[in-house]
Amino acid sequence: MASKRDYYEILSVQRSATADEIKRSYRQAALKFHPDKNPGNKEAEHKFKECSEAYEVLSDPEKRKLYDAYGHDGLRGTAVHDYQHMETDDIFSIFNDILGGRSGGRGGRGRASRGYDLETQVVVTLQDVAKGCDREIDFTRQENCSLCNGTGAKEGSKRRICSTCGGQGKVAQRGFGGMFQMVTTCPSCLGQGSMVEKPCPQCDGAGLSPVKRTLKVHIPPGIHDGQAVGVRGEGELGEGGGHRGDLHVYVRVEEHPFFQRHENDLIVQVPVSIVQAALGAEVEVPTLFGKSSLHVQPGTQHGEVIKLKGLGLPDIQGGRQGNLLAHVLLEVPRKLSRKQEQLLREYASLEEQSVLPAQKNFFEKLKDYLVGDATTAAHVAEDKPKVEHAE
């Protein structure tokens, strides 16, 4: 999963910015990158959704406090809206009071609409990836207020038709000197067509309250870092009787002290002594399933890769098992005992009579290169014009 950018950087504000400064900067950025102004520009659409996510976090005092203290990791379980999977009209609907509303957006009077999707994160290990696991996910989502049962009205009061839009949920505005008319969501009732006379003291008229929820989610074997597990019907409430949105649980895989992942294969660095590499040996290596024996052939060279089949990770689609790839690292001893040094010197003396082919080839090439270079230098010196100095 690609790492997310800093929210303050996205909105071009200082970490000490006030709520009004954050709101102003978000409005400018969102209107600048809105897809209607940048048709077909995927980068602009991504930035529009990115700045909306940043504003949701930084405009919420509790989420901002967690983000300031712990960064993106501090937001796990807070269930920020999943903006990358949302329609831009839905984003305008969420921030209607800031962006001025959009025609055709969700939340219109009497129309059923699906609830917004939410996203959260879970951290797993490579061992979890190898076998699959179940994780309990804590997150917060909006539920109907328990005091007013979602009406938004104080007990004993009722809703009244919105005086701004006359109950239509939309208003017509003229732009560019009255040349054309634009229909937008009513800014007073936010498209509902009605307003409460006296708002509920618990939800302040919103009809919704944040509720913490715990859910068990199955992480399938072979999942990759950044992939998401979707849980249907665990997102926000739909409007007008619409279905709930979904919850997207994005998986973060912890780094392992020994293994690096390449698709379904695991890579491990295995140190081997010069004696083991020269004579061959059985070397113990770690795997995700315990220990295994690695057969090192006599004459193994530094950097060679030895494959242990089936000791990698499973394919998430249920295909073949990956392999463990052991990269041989030839270790040269930094300190030698007198006996070891003596034996190596004896070996070095034998090398003069029986030079290894690879070394012989290298030194023969080096000799030819040096001889050729010296010959070229001599020819250059002979051909160099002599300069006579005037007396």
Image (cartoon, rainbow, N blue to C red):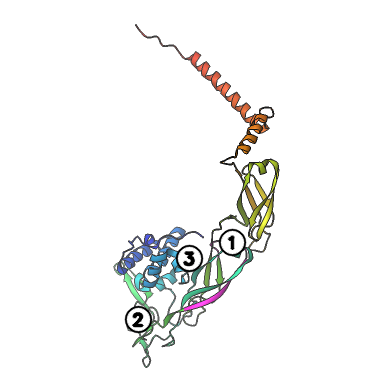
How far apart, in angstroms, are the residues tagged by discs 2 and 1?
Answer: 56 Å
Nearest to the observer: residue 153 or residue 87: 153
Secondary structure state at the residue bearing disc 3: helix
Residue 9 in percent (x, y) is at: 37, 59
Q: Which residue is mark 2?
A: 165
Of labels 2 and 1, the one closer to you: 1
**Residue 276 rendering spot, x and y as whole percentages:** 67, 44
Q: Quadrant of residue 206?
A: bottom left
Q: Amino acid at mark 1?
A: Leu
Instruction: Answer above or below: position of 160 versus 311.
Output: below
Residue appearing at x 40%, y 64% in the figure: 51
CB of mark 3 within 8 Å of CB of mark 2? no
Instruction: Give the residue at mark 1.
Output: 126
Seen from the viewer's position, the closer of residues 336 and 113 is 336
Residue at screen point 68% across, 32% down: 357
The furthest residue to the bottom:
156
Q: Position of residue 129 (x, y in %)?
A: 60, 63
- Helix, strand or loop at label 2? It is loop
| Left or right of 22 in this view: 255 | right
The residue that mark 3 highlights is 84
What type is the residue that disc 3 sits on? Gln
Which residues fall within the magenta stretch?
212-227
| Residue 379 part of the magenta segment | no
Residue drawn where x is 38% and y is 78% of the image: 190
In the displayed structure image, the side of residue 219 where residue 172 appears, left or right: left
